[in-house]
Image (spheres, rainbow, N blue to C red):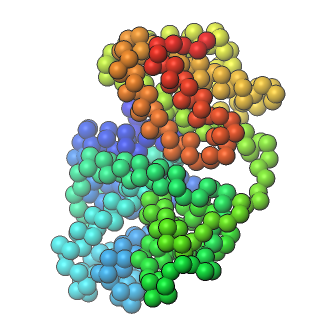
Amino acid sequence: MSLTGNLNTVSIPDLLQLIDSSKKTGMLSLKRQTQKKEIYFKEGNIIYATSSNTEEELLGNLLIRLGKLSQIELEEVLKAHSTTGKMIGAIIVEMGFLKKEQLEEYLKLQIEEIVYNLFSWKEGDFNFQEGKEPAEGQIITNLNTMNVIMEGTRKIDEIVEMQKILPKDNMILSINPNPKIKADSLNFDFEELKVLLMVDGDKTYADLIEQSPLGEYQTSRALLKLINRGIVIAGGKRQTRKDKKREETTVIEILHQVFSTSFSIIDNTLLQKLGRFQEKIWDKVLYQKKSAFPVLDLMMKNGTLLPSQELVLNSNKIPEEVRFHQITQCLQGLLMGYLFQAHNYLGKDITRKLSSEIKKSTAPFLLKDMEITKKYKIEDDLYRDLKMALKGEEIV
């Protein structure tokens, strides 16, 4: 697999696992809109990471949050940094605020936060530069990449569970004017205070995630605490009307994420169990479904589902009145055909595991816009297909 591409086709855990298993040394650069992150590796282990939020902001926030640095001390460090150009960590040690060994431990936490926040990225470009090292003089650490992957996956699972409780994306958040809590109990930790200061009676949960410097996991967790304590409440729905085109684009993006993820899961399992024969199975299914659904030619290239943006553009070539129906029928037919073949070659037990993994992996995409998901019955149809696959039946 090339180490240049888009997260539409390769997930963060898979990308990190590839670098770990191949013992790569170098720098992985990831970009999404205005955000950029860089992760440095040595023989597969993570040794350093930076973020477009700037090192001083992330490290400074972390040390303040842990009570290891005061705001005044941080300002002294930043002033010295702007004057001398030295690394933030080196200045903190030179000024005696922390010993080098202590800083290395907190640096690990900083790097982990940068990497964990990447696990919520579903789109963005990545590129690995072989042999590239951190800047000279930078304090580095050593993190087991597989442990980071496991913890990052756990955090994503936790986010999914929290999102089932948190307000929907179109619900406006505001501070409760009459919380049922005593004034002397109104104490907040660092994350809660950061999120509370962003709640202004106009932002939604989705807005907070987009704008918060804490990352999706910490922001979600802090908001849930504030809601459970009755400090923050969800009010009315934001009165924004999505035009038909925007809604259709959202639907196609969700479908793309759901089905490309599902295909990838089946691909990996068949490849592991059957080797290169997996390609023949996929080609067979694709040939059959193209005969039944000619519109697949607008959705596939070289046997691979087009990126979501290209898929949206090509969908305009399908008559509007049947556009959504044809796209969903094609993708559902392709998934069912593939699952049917998996059931034939690998049996019911493996198909059951595939079904379970698909449900788990696609849950974040289905939760992104529940209004759209329910309106177009995306989740209902997917679960119906998986249920039929367990019976070894294929919907024609």
Q: Quadrant of the C terminus?
A: top right
**Is there any visible trace of residue 192 in the rendered image?**
yes
| Quadrant in the picture for residue 85 | bottom left
Q: Quadrant of the N terminus?
A: top left
The one of 266 and 34 positioned closer to us in this rendering: 266
- Position of residue 152 measured from the top left corner of the image (x, y, whole percent): 36, 51
Point 54% across, 75% down: residue: 231
- Position of residue 242 measured from the top left corner of the image (x, y, whole percent): 76, 50
**Is there any visible trace of residue 37 in the rendered image?**
no
| Quadrant in the picture for residue 202 | bottom right
Point 59% across, 58% down: residue: 167
Q: Is residue 194 above or below residue 343?
A: below
Q: Is residue 77 above or below residue 169?
A: below
Q: Is residue 52 above or below residue 297?
A: below
- Position of residue 20 measured from the top left corner of the image (x, y, whole percent): 27, 43
Side of 325 relative to 220 (left or right): right
Point 22% across, 57% down: residue: 142
Side of 329 relative to 151 (left or right): right
The one of 352 and 43 positioned closer to us in this rendering: 352
| Quadrant in the picture for residue 287 | top right
Side of 316 relative to 25 (left or right): right
- Position of residue 298 measured from the top left corner of the image (x, y, whole percent): 67, 23
Point 38% across, 17% down: residue: 348
